[in-house]
Image (cartoon, rainbow, N blue to C red):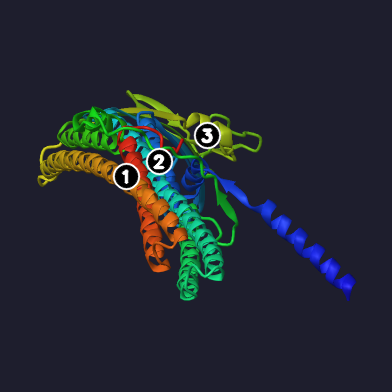
Amino acid sequence: MMIRIFFLTIFCTLSFINSSDAQEEWSLERCIVHARSNSIPIKQTELTIRNAELTEMSNKYSRYPSVSASGNLGANFGRAIDPVSNDFTTESTIFNSFGINASVLLYNGGRIQNSIKQSKLDLEATKMDYEQQKNDIAIQVAGLYLNIVFAEEQLNNARTKYKQTKEQLAITEKLIDAGARPANDRYDIEASIALDEQAIIQQENNVNIGYFNLKQLLQLEPDLDIQLVIPSIPVPEGPITDEFLLKDIYDLSLQSQPQIRAADLKLQSAQMNEEIAKSGKLPIVSLGGNLSANYSNKLLDFQNPNLDNTTIDLSDPVDVVIDGVPSEIQNFQVNGIVFPKTPYFDQLGDNFGQGINLNVRVPIYDNHRNDIAMERARLNVLNTEMTNKLLKQTLKADVQRAITDAQAARLNYDAAVKSTAAQEIAFENAEKRYKLGAINSFEYSTIQNTLDQARVNMIIAKYDYLYKLTIVDFYKGEEITLN
């Protein structure tokens, strides 16, 4: 029995070690990279980028000539026209034809060139949308990351308080044993210990929820054991200065935010679409050419008759007078002449044809379709301009809000630091007075709880301020990092 318990203990210990080794460490940078790599919306945008690239390629290739080849093999039965000799025939005919056609667009009002320019603008705008998505998901990851860091600090604070309360209980029991404190003080402290244990469980739950939310955003399995790399995050010293001026940060955000660049590109694309719509009222000129060859199994070679079995039949003489002179006329008929069929490749060579054509199409009246298309393109330009103005106004408001929030968070943090420092002095004094018996356990616990709440408020203020600073740095175009 003892041997089984020994091996079971060894197995559990090794399992614990392995599970600890399997725990992965994740920094903020790794979380951001992983979230970007596994985000479904970002992957969808990557497909959109590829589609925009194909559109640009298609527009570029539309400038080149188009060439097509065709072939035909068929048979006619009954009365039909021989496609080579153009004679009527009642016999079955097998025919074959080949053709190559080519055409190139010479002028279409600049539609192709403007379409190429527009597709380039659309591609760049899509890439900017892609960068904006990456920035947005980085902000989300940073928020969840800091939530976990905050929850971890709350948990450590709860554990520290639990340890202090346990130490208070030990001191109180000594004082009770010495007759310096009443026995009822033990029950008050034990109640505080129970509350501390409850607070630890609650904070552990908050940490687990934070990890669950982060794993969900990172597309990780919920049971994957990860541990955040929590660096020492210093709070910048001193109050917020002029570096947080709205104009400066707003100007930086106009340059750094991909959504603004994307909006400008979309406006240029809309303006280019207006030019494309105008080309519908201009002529279209194209050049074409073709090559063709035909074959028919009924085409005979009259240049190379077979005379091996020919015979000549003469008719009886007929007396006639030609210019007053008596003469005889005798008719003859050649029989047995055989004309061979023209060989296949000889026919293709003899029937080889070429052609070239220049086509011009001038729009005269199209039921106002081009006019309507031009008007719609113009409306789209105006709508895009208003959308861009609204986007910049929203960005300016967001920047102003981020600055105001950061300034308020800084003041709140400074106040929390001062409050915590004052409560720590008050607690040290209360602790001395409690040991001397000047205050009871209830008064001591009240002061301790006030200190604990002050520390909690300071932690909240700290990470709120750090997150608000991260948002401001984001609008300044800086990388999101905790270092």
Is residue 172 positioned above or below 332 on the image?
Answer: below
The amino acid pointed to by label 3 is Gln
Question: Disc 3 vs disc 2: Cβ atoms closer than 8 Å?
Answer: no
- Observer-nearest of 180 and 246: 180
Tag of residue 418: 1
How far apart, in angstroms, are the residues tagged by discs 3 and 2? 53 Å
- Observer-nearest of 339 and 28: 28
Residue 202, horizontal then vertical, whole percent: 46, 66
The amino acid pointed to by label 1 is Lys
Residue 249, horizontal then vertical, whole percent: 25, 31
Is residue 172 positioned above or below 359 on the image?
Answer: below
How far apart, in angstroms, are the residues tagged by discs 3 and 1? 105 Å
N-terminal label among 3 and 2? 2
N-terminal label among 3 and 1? 3
Tag of residue 49: 2
Question: Disc 3 vs disc 1: Cβ atoms closer than 8 Å?
Answer: no
Residue 243, horizontal then vertical, whole percent: 26, 28
The amino acid pointed to by label 2 is Ile
Q: Is residue 374 at least partly visible in the picture?
A: yes
- From the image, state whether disc 3 or disc 2 is nearer to you: 2
User: Which secondary structure lies at badge 3?
Assistant: helix
How far apart, in angstroms, are the residues tagged by discs 2 and 1? 52 Å
Q: Would you name the residue on which mark 3 appears?
A: 347
